[in-house]
Amino acid sequence: MPEGFEPERYLAHERRRLGDKARYLLHTIHTQSIFNQRHRKDGVHLKAEYLRKIMGRHYLGIISDLEGHVIEVDRVARDGLSNRYRLAAQYRAARVKRYVPSDSYLIPKLIERRAELQESPTCPTRQHLLEQLRRVRVDLDTARQMLEGLSLDGERFAASESCLERLNEQEWFFSADRFGRVHHNVTCLKRELRACLRVDGERLIETDISNSQPLFCGLTYFLWEKNQGSFAQLWTEEAFDSALALKEENLEQLILLKQQIQQSTTTSNPTTLPLRCAGLHGTNNDSLKYLLLCEAGQIYEYMAQAVGVDISDSAARGEFKEQVYSELLYAKWRDFNNPLVQAFQAEFPSLFHMILQVNHRDHRRLAQWMQRVEARLVIDGVVAKFAEERPEAFVLTIHDSVLTKPDDATYVRDLFRQEFGRFAVHPTLKQK
């Protein structure tokens, strides 16, 4: 619970005995804002049916009593969407403390809910990841010291501290979504704090893909192109493999483009590369060049130079990456006068056309398909092979990256190269 919250101060007289149910509502909002980080800004979606099941028939009255003082409610319940909930500002930034409920109605509901959450996934690879998660420990004292040194506002500090506490107390969270990704205690942990994770007393090595999100966007384009502007029929492994094989069908042009890109990295102006060439076997050369830049880990530098932005230091590069995500790949709407949007459209018209077409009705659709591609390659490819060949070794994913013990770092890097190489894709890998 957020420190300082006393439900009796807000609940109507006839509902003051329902304080534990009010506490559970705050607990749920707080927990979902940590583990479903994409909802942190706008609030977490909570279905009325779920709240009624756990909190009982008084749930609407409790929400009404707390609204405006303790919680914020965005009433968007329509077309299958549920209302969004956020803690009020003073409680978002508050430190949290553990509270043990005593409500005789609520406790059995919580036990039932916890049992549901702890059910193992049916997929063997994801079940293996859950088992590996339970091996993770955290050097809490060091992590707290590092957290104090990070420049975080009150809300993000409180969320990070709560995430560390849950990990330290082995209060496991694990969820596999419908797009193939898995979310758990480590995926919500700040990147800087991962250095404090331990398995069997050993530090962990993270193998990461450079330019991973743009790369998966490029691979998604190949899927979309192969299926004539649709994702509808690309559910089988055979169709997936066939789509990504498009690269091999353009081998000669790929070699030429790769040579040009390699030469450009030694010059001060890589934007002099030939941009829109004639299509070859149905695939536009700008999409091939885009994919090669992503493989080389150079797409952000390429686009930054195209719009005249200096990203030579890490902070500026991070800001530019967020700009690419928010204004281009995952934008709810696009400003066509934006220099970044204009430059991307000019340099990579095939990719830009796909982004507009796929996200026309739902700006989340491209991201969801990119996650399918990511999960297919990383979890169902790299991790599945790792678990099969080294079942006793530790492995855990953080979406597109993989955590292992140091002795397995070279092996997992080789698996990345083998799995992606099956589709003639050769990403730049980083280990830290």
Image (tube, grey):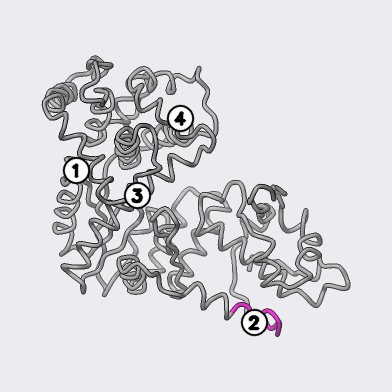
Task: Judge whether residue 305 is colored magenta.
Answer: no
| Crowding near the residue tagged with mark 3, few <14, some 14–19, many ≥20 C-alpha atoms within 10 Å | few
**Residue on which disc 1 sits:** 423
What residue do we see at 15% from left, 64% from top? 407
Work out how far the residue at label 4 is from the one at label 3, CA to CA, in angstroms.
20 Å
Q: CA distance from mark 1 to mark 3?
A: 17 Å
Does 135 sit left or right of 293 as displayed?
Answer: right
Which residue carries the number 4 mark? Answer: 357
Which quadrant of the view contains residue 305? top left
Sequence-earlier tag: 4 or 3: 3
Residue, x 19% and y 68% (percent of image)?
388
Mark in the foreground, 2 or 4: 4
**Residue bounds of the magenta highlight:** 102-110
For marks 1 and 3 on the same chain, the one whose residue lies earlier in the sequence: 3
Return the residue found at the far right. 13
Where 82 sits versus 245, above or below?
below
SS at circle 2: helix
Q: Residue at x 88, y 73 (%)?
A: 14
| Number of the label disc, if any, that sits on residue 235 | 3
Residue 174 image position (x, y, % from top left): 43, 66
Question: Which residue is label 2 attached to?
Answer: 107
Q: Quadrant of the N terminus?
A: bottom right
Depth order, front residue of 424/10: 424
